[in-house]
Each structure stands twice: as C-alpha cells, then as structure tokens.
Image: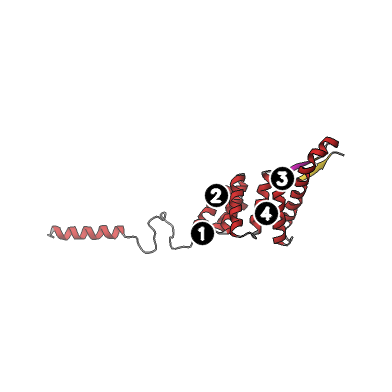
Amino acid sequence: MRSPSFLLVLLATIAASACTPSAGVSRNAPYGTDASGKAVDGLLVGHRLMEAGEYELALKAYYRAAGETGVTVDTLASIGSANLALGRLGQAESILRKALEVDATFVPALNNLGVALMERGKYGEARVVFQRAFAQDSGQTDSIRENLKLAIARSEASVYDGVQEEEEGGFRLVRQEKGKYVLLTEL
C-alpha cells in the first residue's frame, strides 16, 4: 500500500498538468479551433462585409482591426465609411475628419467626408472637400467626379433656389439612389 503523501504528490502533479495549456492551444480558444493559425486581417474582413451590405458587422471588424494594428488613417476611414453606410452621419463626419487629421491627402476619407456633408445639407463645404479629393485623385475616379458635379449643382442651387422659386418655379434636386441626384427644372 502506498503512503498518503505519495497519493497527494500524484494528485498535485495531475492537477498541475491539467491546468497547463498544451502547446499551441489558447485557454480562450473555442473547442475545435486551431489557435496557432493566423487570423484574417480585420480591414479585409470589414471590406468584404461592406460589399455584402453587412455594415454593422463590418464596423465591428474595423474596430477589431484598429485594436490589432492601431488607429491608422485606413482604420479611421473604414470606421467612418461604415458609420456613413449605417446612416450615422454625425459620427461618420467626426471620424472621417479625424482620419484626415492623420493624412489630409487620403482620397477615400475625403470622398466619404464629402458624401457625409452632402447628406447633412452642408453643400458648400462638401464641394470644397470633393474638389480636394478630385485634385488628390487627379480626376481618375468617376464617382468622385460625379460627386463633385453634384456638390457644385447642389451648392449653386441652394444659393439661387430662393430667387428662382419666386420667378419661375426654380430647380429641384431629386434623389434617385443613395448618393445620386438629378437636377430638375420646370420649363
């Protein structure tokens, strides 16, 4: 028969080995996952979710990316874009402005800030932002060109709208799709 102290040492050894995680397995990893594998970049996941129309999930992926890689102009612009897609215009504008503080020449942040400003009715400021985006992009992106045209029409329509309506009915800007407008007049 073995001594009680031997059994005590044996039980302590078994308990200690049970508490020690095995090589490559994280204590917080769900059962059946490979903790040694590399995670997919949060920005990439967020971009794919944005394309799929899953804006809330994309926002969470962008927050995860910011936590993993740090707060960069890419993560800030992406978070702002997701907020814009969710209709959180104030948050989107604020975050996109922070992205431009990091890099004032980042074209996607400029474009999305312009869209947020247009949606909030700040047409003159949106026009200036789109002009900056157009200049930084060297006029290569069609969507920025269209956004600039729209901002110019909208800012000029807001200046002349009151005078035109008194005289002959004026112009109306009609929204066709998200971010696309048509300028109509009564002839």
Q: Earlier in the sequence, mark 4 or mark 1?
A: 1
Distance Cα–Cα, label 3 vs label 1: 35 Å
Q: Earlier in the sequence, mark 3 or mark 1?
A: 1
* Quadrant of the image occupied by residue 10: bottom left
User: What is the span of residues highlighted in magenta in the rendered image?
Assistant: 172-178
Q: Nearer the viewer, mark 1 or mark 2?
A: 1
Q: Nearer the viewer, mark 3 or mark 1?
A: 1
Residue 130 percent across, percent down from the top left: 71, 54
Verify whether residue 150 appears in magenta.
no
* Quadrant of the image occupied by residue 140: bottom right
Distance Cα–Cα, label 4 vs label 2: 22 Å
Residue 44 visible in the displayed image: no
Element class at badge 2: helix
Q: Nearer the viewer, mark 4 or mark 3?
A: 4
The residue lying furthest to the right in this view is 187
Q: Local crowd at mark 4 within 10 Å, few (<14), some, or many (≥20)?
A: many
Element class at badge 3: strand
